């Protein structure tokens, strides 16, 4: 029997050369790992609506300028995941860890120092590239 399929939207929120990352709460799937904010898409929900909802629930912020930049597919032993990655900006609110253990603003070059889920590896490699032109390429290949 194939593993369940999960669809999730991820936000790349950058401020002054730093990306916002969240630490997953311990105990759950990949607990303690760092990730980009976002979450699971509900059946029939538009991708941008999903991301706006998740960022409001997880961080207490509203976002603007949602721009799709990548699609990532990854298969874990227990589930198959499809991520749609968006660049966006905070329109209102200050990020708070409402559904995360912690938040951090991290320079792109330091992202590799954090333990991210295997599904995020290609994104981390791309974002931490020494070439700014490559980092901001849209859409980028993953």
Image: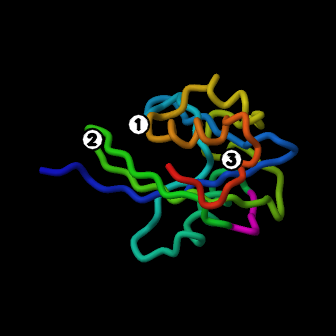
With 6 as the anchor, is 96 left or right in this view? right
Marks 2 and 1 close (CB-CB < 8 Å): yes
For marks 3 and 1, the one nearer the N-term is 1
Name the residue located 74 percent from the left edge and 48 percent from the top edge. Answer: 133
With 108 as the anchor, is 112 left or right in this view? left
Q: In front of the other: label 3 or label 2?
A: 3
For disc 2, the marked residue is 78
Q: Secondary structure at mark 3?
A: helix
Task: Report the Cα–Cα distance between label 3 and label 1.
Answer: 31 Å
With 20 as the anchor, is 139 left or right in this view? left
Coloration of the structure image: rainbow
Task: Report the Cα–Cα distance between label 2 and label 1.
Answer: 10 Å
Q: Is residue 60 above or below residue 132?
A: below
Region in magenta = 61-66
Q: Secondary structure at mark 1?
A: loop
Q: Position of residue 42 (x, y in %)?
A: 44, 67
Marks 3 and 1 close (CB-CB < 8 Å): no
For disc 3, the marked residue is 134
Classify 10 Å Cα crowding around label 3: few (below 14), some (14-19), many (20 and above). Answer: few
For marks 2 and 1, the one nearer the N-term is 1
């Amino acid at each position: 029997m194939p593993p369940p399929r999960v669809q999730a939207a991820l936000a790349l929120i950058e401020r002054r050369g730093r990306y916002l990352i969240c630490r997953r709460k311990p105990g759950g799937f990949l607990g303690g790992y760092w990730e980009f904010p976002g979450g699971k898409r509900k059946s029939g929900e538009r991708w941008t609506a999903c991301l706006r909802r998740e960022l409001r629930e997880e961080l207490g912020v509203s976002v603007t300028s949602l721009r799709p930049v990548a699609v990532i597919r990854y298969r874990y032993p227990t589930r198959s995941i499809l991520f749609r990655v968006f660049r966006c900006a905070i329109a209102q609110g200050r990020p708070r860890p409402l559904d995360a253990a912690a938040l951090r603003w991290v320079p792109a070059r330091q992202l590799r120092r954090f333990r991210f889920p295997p599904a995020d590896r290609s994104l981390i490699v791309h974002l931490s590239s020494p070439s700014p032109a490559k980092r901001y390429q849209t859409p980028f290949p993953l």
